[in-house]
Amino acid sequence: MAEITDFFLNNNNGLMARNFTNHNAVLDKDGAMVTFWTGSSRLHWSQRVDVGSNVVSKYKDDVTSGLNRYGSGANWDRYGPGLYLANLPKWDGELDYVAIVASDDPYDYIKLWNGVRNGENITWTEGIQFFSTADQRNSMFSACSTNQAIIAYATKDDETMICGRVNPATDSRYAVLNEVTYWYTTLHTCFCDHDGEGGFLGGVATGTGLPPTDFVYIPMSHIDSSFGTPVDIGLAAVLDTGDFIENVDMAYDSKNSAIGFITSVYDDSEDELVMYFGTSVNAGTDWTINTITQGGSGTFVGSVSGVAESHVQIMSGAEGGFIIGYTAENSSGYARPYVHQCTINGSGTSYIMGEAKECGQAIKKYSASTDIIGPVFFRPPAEREVNIDPIGQVYIAYQMDQGNDFSDPYFQETSKTVSVAYERLDEVAYPPAAAATYTIDTAGSGEFVVPVKILGTASEKQDYYDMGFIGDETDKYIDAFATVGTVVGIKQYIPRDDVYIGGRAAYNSPVEYSVKVLFDPKSWTAPNPELGETAFEEYINRDLRKVYLPPTFYMATVENTSKSETKQYTVWTLEHDGYTYEIRQVIPRFIDGQIVYYEANCYNTGNYSVWSRGGGY
Amino acid sequence: MSFKLTAGTDTSRTAAEATELATYNPSTGVGGLDFQSLQYLQTRVLEFKIANTGASKATFTVSITSLNTDLATNTTLSLDGTNYSTSVVVYVEANRVSNVIYMKHFVDTSVEDTLGQGTIKIKVVES
């Protein structure tokens, strides 16, 4: 089930900005999923951390960070600020996150904020400002990160795109890599992505007024960081008069030297968007443009923003291919996130766009008339790549509800609580296929049926005897245990899940067994302790015993989480010669693929509490 | 058909004396030949013989077939326990029993991604 974090957004487009493509959901180096958004002049974030089977969700309203747009008390632009989250894995311990924030306001700036994880909190410090304020007159911007640097694009003025690079660990100011003058009036958007080799690529959409006459891709040289010759990708050729670009995103598929982009285009009016998807398999030289068969029943027109919104996203896969996502209306007229899987053909020369899949499991906790704005893909940090096959393991975030109307014509100041939800794509969009099964053959004339049972991957927590890993060797050992084994009492304590307290009370009454086992004649030498002192050896002798159990005696363990969120496992104890031992480190032993015995260490429970440890082996 | 399958350990000299292997019963899971449980990358070899119950010398072509293509693909036969192929041909005198035929199944993770109980069939064609 999708997890939901409620927050007071104060920003309709805080998570899903319009006219920008926020990359603000990150799978960090610890495996935590962190989502950032902006609202009410502050940065907010929530994280979802998997600890075993426990999921810990945290929400943080970073009131004290002072990570404002450009001054205390100021609010974010009504269309949502551009927000790019970078995570630089090679600087562990020095820098955990870098947030780049900007807006399309003429006087906004692009600034780095360095965030350092401190347990459940992130401490933000103001970092380097990209470019000068005077350069930001049309500061539609994009950013990407390699493993060593943050790259940001912006417009310097009406005609020039500027690209800067910062290494937050070593640089005190940004370095302008390059400028390119190519367009004449308003820059609609720009975008970039790293190419997996430490370099990066840039792109820009532009036009001489409306409709756009050009949509160009501008490559960036690995060698000297210079801009290459802009390439007209041919989008204008498929557009009609009156169309203009609403939003663009781009990703670089390093495995196949392919670049993909998705764009939404206003079709004549501001209430209808058409999606286009373009790919190049030769590093941006030649492009193929296709219309996307959109999911849902039409364009989503925000009741708060008053205009069509797409919130397009694209993310590349480590082994090739892309996922694209956008917002559209479902058949009932409410906004929903849609995703498509785009796979590359066998020869790597073209892409096949899969059908639209609707997301939004979290709607089950809301009214069906709630709009869902999204998705944002959770991306790996910096140059790391995400595996999108199987696509069901990809996580997305989305925003429940639109908030309410603006109280200010320029800045965000809504007053309605909305929520961010997390969802795996196999929850709704790509449910797992039913488990395949084998067929039982029927013997015809001259035929003889032979069964075979495929078990798959081995695990120490399997009853191999019951599963048929038996034979003559197994029988020999069963006979040996019956003949020379020592009878001991073994107790199985199964944890309860209906109590708040820990310790022994969190376990049921034991199930008792009487079993013939074999003790290692000099148990305390295995595992190998530091021996040589008689008293110490005697102590170990009492404390630790190596024991062998018959192949028929499988000790199953179950894992429970008590009401106090404490994880507990089954505890097995062995009673022998007046001592009680806990059985741990159980290892199955095989001969010729047949289970012959289990080997285990037994620890004298007189010296520690098995209950506080939680049991398990 | 004038043959019967016998266990590889059956030392009967004549086909008449040989004990025919039990037919697999899906409801009980018991059969005369059984690969039992196999994990990924595990191999198991079964042995059987063909007893010619006919009145004259016969040639038997033994192969593997199944509705479960993956299982059949990874099951091979051999007359010497070393060289395995998809089928073997044995010549058996009248009322005699063949040498041991080896049947090997290897769980290849590149092919078999389904878990659970399945079956293959030994197909014997007399010519």
Image (cartoon, rainbow, N blue to C red):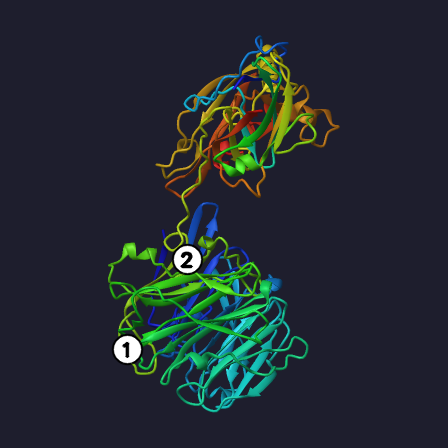
Q: Chain of mark 1?
A: A
Name the residue at 46% across, 55% down.
A391
**Residue at label 1?**
A306
User: Residue A424, percent across and down?
Assistant: 42, 54
* Nearer the observer, A573 or B15: B15
Closest to the camera, between mark 2 and mark 1, is 1
In the rendered structure, which disc, 2 or 1, sits on the residue that comes first in sequence? 2
* Nearer the observer, A180 or A166: A180
Q: Say whether residue A462 is visible.
A: no
Q: Is residue A383 above or below residue A67?
A: above
* Nearer the observer, A86 or A579: A86
Looking at the image, residue B32 sits to the left or right of residue B92; the answer is left
Q: Is residue A561 above or below residue A18?
A: above
**Furthest residue toward top:** B17
Question: Which corner quadrant of the image does residue A40 belong to?
Answer: bottom left
User: Residue A533, percent across and down?
Assistant: 74, 27
Question: Which corner quadrant of the image does residue B26 belong to?
Answer: top left
Q: Is residue A556 above or below residue A174?
A: above
Q: Chain of mark 2?
A: A
Q: Is residue A239 above or below residue A282?
A: below
Looking at the image, residue A386 sits to the left or right of residue A356; the answer is right
Kind of residue at badge 2: Lys
Identify the disc placed on residue A58: 2
